[in-house]
Image (tube, helix red, strand yellow):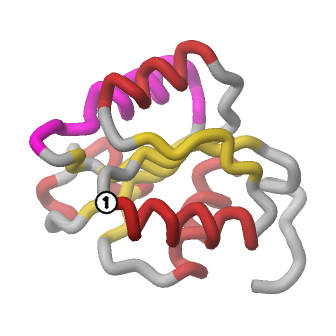
Amino acid sequence: MGSVSPLRAARSILIVEDELLVGLELEQILRDAGWHVIARVNSVSAALAAIATTKIDAAVVDLNLGRESAYPVVDMLSAKGIPFMILTGYAIEDVRQEHRRRTVGKPFQSDELIGALDRAIAA
């Protein structure tokens, strides 16, 4: 992946993902890219609590958390001005229009994920 971008060096990131193996993969990819993974949570309530109580510089959010939609998490991140990107297995048309530009589909490539995050925090 090359050198660590100053955009992400020593920055904290929250992972919101309900699938254990995907969450572990995301954690490794993000750490390899220079992020400090502050937490990996698997529910809306845990994500909202982490955002409310922890300094977070960015987040990666799976849009579908089991039977829950992660839009409350996305809305809170937006309200707080925290950059984020969405991961989803759904079609891009199923994502709210205002969030489509920051959405990466599953399955994803590491470089695609890191590029989307870099664009989100640079915006």
Q: Amino acid at mark 1?
A: Glu
**Percent of width and height locating residue 14:** 57, 42
Give the number of marks: 1
Residue linked to disc 1: 19
The N terminus - image quarter: bottom right
* Magenta span contains residue 76: yes
Q: Is residue 82 left or right of residue 35?
A: left
Q: Who's the residue at 31% across and 71% down the image? A: 105
User: Which x, y percent locates residue 52?
Assistant: 54, 14
State whether residue 88 is above or below residue 16: below
* Circle 1 Cα neighbour tier, 10 Å, few/some/many (<14 / 14–19 / ≥20): few
Q: Point out the stretch of residues depicted in magenta.
A: 67-82
Q: Which residue is depicted at the point 65% across and 22% down?
A: 54
Classify residue 32 by image quadrant.
bottom right
Q: Is residue 11 magenta?
A: no
Picture coordinates of residue 4, whole percent (x, y): 86, 69
Q: Looking at the magenta stretch, what is its main secondary structure? A: helix
**Which residue is found at the position 31% from the left and 36% from the top?**
43
Vertical position of residue 36 compared to residue 46: above or below: below
| Between 115 and 22, the one nearer to me in the picture | 22
Q: Position of residue 34 (x, y in %)?
A: 80, 63
Q: Is residue 68 left or right of residue 34?
A: left
